[in-house]
Amino acid sequence: MKHTLLLLMCAACSGVSSRDANTGDDLLSSSSSSDSQERADGVAGNAEQIMSQPEFEAFDVDDGSHTEESAVQSSVAVATEDNDSEVATEPEEESVPAVAIQLRAGENLGDVASWGGLKVEELAQRNGIRVNDTVFPGQTLFIPMADGVDEASILEAREQLLTHRLEMFVERRDGLLGVTTREVGTGESAWNIAKTEGNLPHWVLAAYNDDLNLNELRVGDTLIIPVMGDTITALIEAEEEPAQEHFELAGVH
């Protein structure tokens, strides 16, 4: 536009005719069109050169048709792809089946761990407790079954340990003479009965009455009481002591 005004002013000053001025405009217009065409051809050539390069990657121009939802989905897909390698490298934790055991009187964590071929620390961790935590009769513990250990082998190991302990106990108490029965009276507990009937440990009374829950005895329940050899010996000695004292007072030796 500036070129056109300049030519018109020159034409007015030099007396150039309007035809000459028009001729100048035509020349200028032709020159401007030629320049524009050259620039367009140059841009097109540059574009072809850029697209021919190996590192060039085509991309879509956002024309406003993409919604916010599609953008979110795209970002989620990219994040998922980035995390795939991390998830794949982490080993999946295997679920190991376990046997539920209710503790009996006299059993401890070491006993239970030995039935499953475990360390006490492993058993405690599996059950969410500490090694030095107190366990009690009736408490449920889970023994994982692994490395050839199954429910049958766990129960068998449990009974073998109980049998061995009873044998050792009976031997220390001068043998087992037999068993007797005893009904639970009002206000009595398994602990009191075990003490009065031969000074028995709670776990021994529980072993002979495994069909009863000794923590929930009721009046009229019948208990089986093992009679130990040293119990009878103590009773005989207790009966002989008054007679011996009587003879000593009478001067009989």
Image: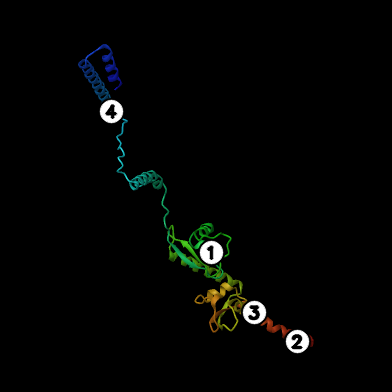
Q: Tags 3 and 4 in contact by the CB under 8 Å rule?
A: no
In this figure, which residue is indicated by the disc labeled 4?
47
Query: What number is the disc on residue 111?
Result: 1
Q: CA distance from mark 1 to mark 2?
A: 51 Å
Q: Earlier in the sequence, mark 3 or mark 4?
A: 4
In this figure, which residue is indicated by the disc labeled 2?
246
Quadrant of the rendered image containing residue 58: top left
Residue 99 percent location from the top left of the image: 45, 64
In this figure, which residue is indicated by the disc labeled 3?
233
Q: What amino acid does circle 1 point to?
A: Asp
In this view of the protein, which residue sits in the foreground, 234 or 209? 209
Q: Is residue 200 above or below residue 42?
A: below
Which element type, helix, strand or loop, lies under badge 1?
A: helix
Q: Tags 4 and 1 in contact by the CB under 8 Å rule?
A: no
Q: CA distance from mark 3 to mark 4?
A: 114 Å
Q: CA distance from mark 2 to mark 4?
A: 131 Å
Tell me the quadrant of the picture where the C terminus can be found. bottom right
